[in-house]
Amino acid sequence: MAPPSKLGVQASALQRLVKEEASYHKELEQQESRITKLQSNPGEDNADYLLKQERQALEETKKVLPTVREKIEQTLEQLEEELENNKDGGAASPEEVTKAQDAIAAGKKALAQSA
């Protein structure tokens, strides 16, 4: 089996970044629900400590999202350039081209949702 082309590698990287961003958004929702639960039920002995820890984790997750979004934008741009270069008889297989086009669509969708 031939090694993946540059197009295939970049498509995989973009797909990974899109999944990573989705997992951070899911983590954000989970943290917010845990904070709400702790605020509505402060009966535990260490509720203040737990609330502080959850808020800190929430803030750290929020700080990561802009970096991931920036990486998605950069990788998306590079992948589009590589796809354009590949049109002139590049080494990528038709499957890799399709994978790249799907990754570009997923990347644009992720950027639109997080905007």
Image (cartoon, rainbow, N blue to C red):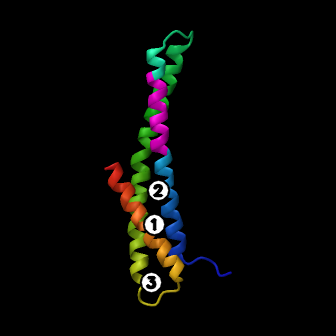
Q: Please rate how many residues cluster around mark 3, counting C-alpha atoms within 10 Å: few if below 14, some from 14 to 19, many from 20.
A: some
Which region is colored magenta? 24-36
Q: Please rate how many residues cluster around mark 2, counting C-alpha atoms within 10 Å: few if below 14, some from 14 to 19, many from 20.
A: many
Q: Position of residue 4 (x, y in %)?
A: 59, 76
Label annotation for residue 103: 1
Mark 2 element type = helix
Whichever of callouts 2 and 3 sits on the residue coming sooner in the sequence is 2
When the figure is inspected, residue 109 is found, relative to residue 4, above or below; the finding is above
Residue at the (41%, 83%) spot, across then down: 85
Mark 3 element type = helix
Q: Which residue is mark 3?
A: 86
Q: Which residue is mark 2?
A: 18
What's the amino acid at mark 3? Answer: Asn
The N terminus lies in quadrant:
bottom right
Q: Nearer the viewer, mark 1 or mark 3?
A: 1
Residue at the (53%, 17%) spot, across then down: 49
